[in-house]
Amino acid sequence: MTLLVALDFASVAVFALTGALVASRAQLDLVGFIFIACLTALGGGTLRDMLINRDPVFWIGQPAYLAVASLAALVVFVA
């Protein structure tokens, strides 16, 4: 894993934590936590990939991004 890929995963985790904290303030359930965290963490990159017509979208091509965002939501939900 290169430094650039590690920073990419770290940025997804940070944005997912941000989304999960918003879900916490709204007192959502676990599914809401995961949805808001993934939307926050992956939404911008998805929009970018769709605008430049990249196929597949980055998190579909490598689902580890989705797993990192979901794990970050789970951490905030449990804490």
Image (tube, rainbow, N blue to C red):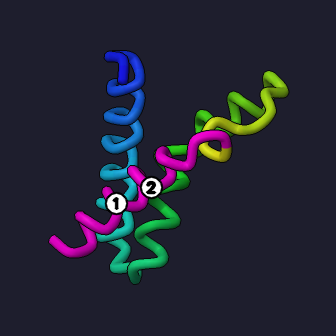
Tell whether 62 sits left or right of 55. Answer: left
Q: Is residue 70 magenta?
A: yes
Dot 1 surroundings within 10 Å: few (below 14), some, or many (20 or more)? some
**62 sits to left or right of 7:** right
Q: Quadrant of the C terminus?
A: bottom left
| SS category of the residue bearing label 2 | helix
> Would residue 77 be counted in the magenta stretch?
yes
Image point (31%, 56%), residue name: 72
- Image quadrant assignment for residue 4: top left
Residue 78: name its quadrant: bottom left
**Amino acid tagged 1:** Leu
Furthest residue in direction top, as rendered: 3
Quarter of the image that includes the N terminus: top left
Q: Position of residue 21 (x, y in %)?
A: 29, 60
Q: Is residue 16 above or below residue 73?
A: above
Residue that label 2 marks: 67
Task: Check disc 1 and report the residue beneath it.
Answer: 71
From which residue to which does the magenta span run?
A: 61-79
Q: Residue at x 79, y 27 (%)?
A: 54
Q: CA distance from mark 1 to mark 2?
A: 6 Å
Residue at x 33%, y 50% (from the top left corner): 18
Is mark 1 in CB contact (under 8 Å) with mark 2? Answer: yes
- Mark 1 secondary-structure assignment: helix
| Residue 33 spot, x, y in % from top left | 41, 70
Relative to 75, does residue 67 appear above or below in the rendering? above
Where residue 40 appears, as percent x and y from the top left, is 49, 49
Q: Residues within 10 Å of mark 2 (few under 14, many from 20)?
A: some
Q: Amino acid at mark 2?
A: Ala
Q: Position of residue 42 (x, y in %)?
A: 54, 44
| Residue at the image position 71 percent from the left and 38 percent from the top | 57
Which residue, as the protein is rendered here, is positioned at the far bottom?
A: 29
